[in-house]
DNA sequence: CGGACGATTGACCCAAATCAACACCGGTGG
DNA sequence: CCACCGGTGTTGATTTGGGTCAATCGTCCG
């Protein structure tokens, strides 16, 4: 298992229609690192598009256990599901800038746009694919594979040649991959020592060219 | 963690609009146990509604590892995501009867129905919630909790008083919960010996009244 | 400089995987 | 009717990957 389906989705299909809605009607908001953008269970009053920074989508169980379902970056949307309440919490990983639109305004804009509903459907379908990929990754693979796949997916998002920033902490990655913080740390060390990746500090990494064990996708293309 | 969010969603909201489309335009099809209804990666030519039986939604990785993402029962839909291809395989667990509609016919019907797009959006949102609940369940809980939660969710679907049929095999449950077949079997034995559940053969079970440790939902309502 | 928080590394342990044997059940054919 | 057989489920023995607990190290920042 060496996949990169999770982050490698294209945004062209639906992005344009929805992005235009946000571009014309959005209000800019800013959140400090670690702050809660929307809490789990709160009523959905606004929808958002990420302009800058990294957002983590979390789900908390009664025991206080946390699962990080996904990390969102520039261009991603929050709150399109049409639910009354936020099923998941949305939290700022680093400094986050969002475009916000009141839900009623957004719904009216979507209804009047020619492909509005279709765009939302496409976005939700991609989210299903993203979660499915995480379920597969989480179920059948070793800790090392999970971390490698995560890093590949995250690097694949951006330019791959230079060092990429890893804005979230080890605990965030651990809660995303279903591992402990220590195991994530150890896995990264293993990848570094074996030469697969290079680190600059603990928040910047890069895949080394030589040891390309597998860049071929394991999971089917999403969407 | 003792939840039952996975199966306990209401179908009223969107079910009606879509169900009517299937009722008026569907063609009945039958599949024998274990057969493939749609294979992963195939083009989506038809959409379906389950009339009878149990369908498992699977995802296969290149290694041949299988993850069972969900089990579908009467009233559930297949293929609403709008994707070009089947992201996941759809397989008959037992004898399955489906209503099928060619995709173009279905899309036209949805476009003309007043709340058609909205209904699909709601259905997809519920699927996101279902996968999220499975991710949380899979990440932070013991084998016993996973099996208990799965059985509770499955029982909650139907009438709870009498024995309920468990159409899928132990391996199916294992691949759903991210466990080995043996661990599933052992967990069921533990629940039986401790008196939480009663079994009739290996395919019928019932929760016993006395030992109600937790029926309160741990995860938020899926909406 | 010193405190604090995150990351790393080490030592140990346990829940569940794996490997293996056996029981059960339904079907088939002599 | 019973013997056989293959598939599924159960149970037992053993191993192991990663969790947990704990100490140390950086690094950022006041």
Image (spheres, coloured by chain):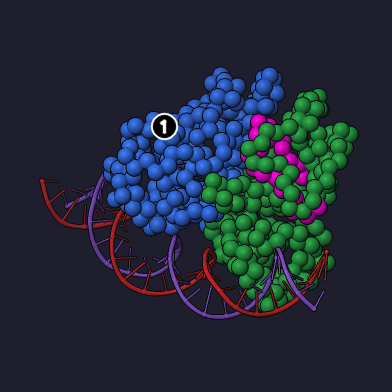
Chain colours: A green, B blue, C purple, D red
| Residue B31 spot, x, y in % from top left | 45, 36
Task: Report the front residue among B63 and A52.
Answer: A52
Indicate whether D13 appears above or below B172.
Answer: below
Seen from this angle, which residue lies furthest right? A24
The overriding secondary structure of the stretch rendered in magenta is loop
Answer yes or no: is residue A125 visible. no
What chain does mark 1 sit on? B
Q: Which residues are magenta?
A: A76-95
Q: Is residue B201 above or below residue A194?
A: above
Residue B174 percent across, percent down from the top left: 45, 52
Q: Observer-nearest residue: B92 or B73?
A: B73
- Please state which of residues A223 and A189 is positioned toward the viewer in this rendering: A189
Task: Tell me the quarter of the image containing the C terminus of chain B.
Answer: top right
**Disc 1 designates what residue?**
B158
In this view, A203 is above or below A37: below
Identified at 75% across, 61% down, the residue is A166
Placement of A177 over or under A212, stated as above or below:
above
The residue that appears at 53% across and 25% down in the rendered structure is B27
């Amino acid at each position: 298992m060496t996949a990169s389906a999770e982050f490698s989705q294209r945004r062209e299909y639906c992005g344009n229609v929805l992005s235009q809605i946000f571009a014309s009607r959005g209000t800019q908001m800013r959140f400090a690192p670690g702050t809660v953008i929307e809490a789990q269970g709160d009523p959905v009053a606004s929808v958002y598009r990420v302009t800058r920074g990294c957002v983590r989508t979390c789900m908390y169980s009664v025991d206080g256990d946390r699962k990080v379902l996904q990390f969102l970056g520039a261009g991603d949307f929050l709150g399109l599901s049409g639910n009354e309440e936020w099923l998941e919490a949305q939290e700022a990983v680093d400094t986050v800038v969002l475009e916000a639109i009141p839900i009623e305004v957004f719904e009216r804009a979507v209804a009047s746009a020619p492909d509005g509903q279709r765009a939302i459907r496409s976005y939700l379908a991609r989210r299903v694919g993203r979660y499915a990929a995480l379920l597969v990754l989480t179920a059948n693979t070793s800790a090392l594979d999970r971390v490698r796949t995560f890093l590949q997916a995250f690097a694949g998002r951006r330019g791959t040649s230079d060092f990429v920033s890893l804005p979230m902490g080890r605990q965030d990655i651990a809660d995303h991959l279903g591992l402990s913080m220590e195991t994530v740390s150890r896995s990264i060390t293993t990848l570094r020592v074996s030469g697969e990746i290079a680190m600059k500090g603990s928040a910047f990494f890069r895949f080394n060219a030589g040891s390309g064990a597998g860049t071929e996708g394991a999971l089917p293309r999403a969407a």
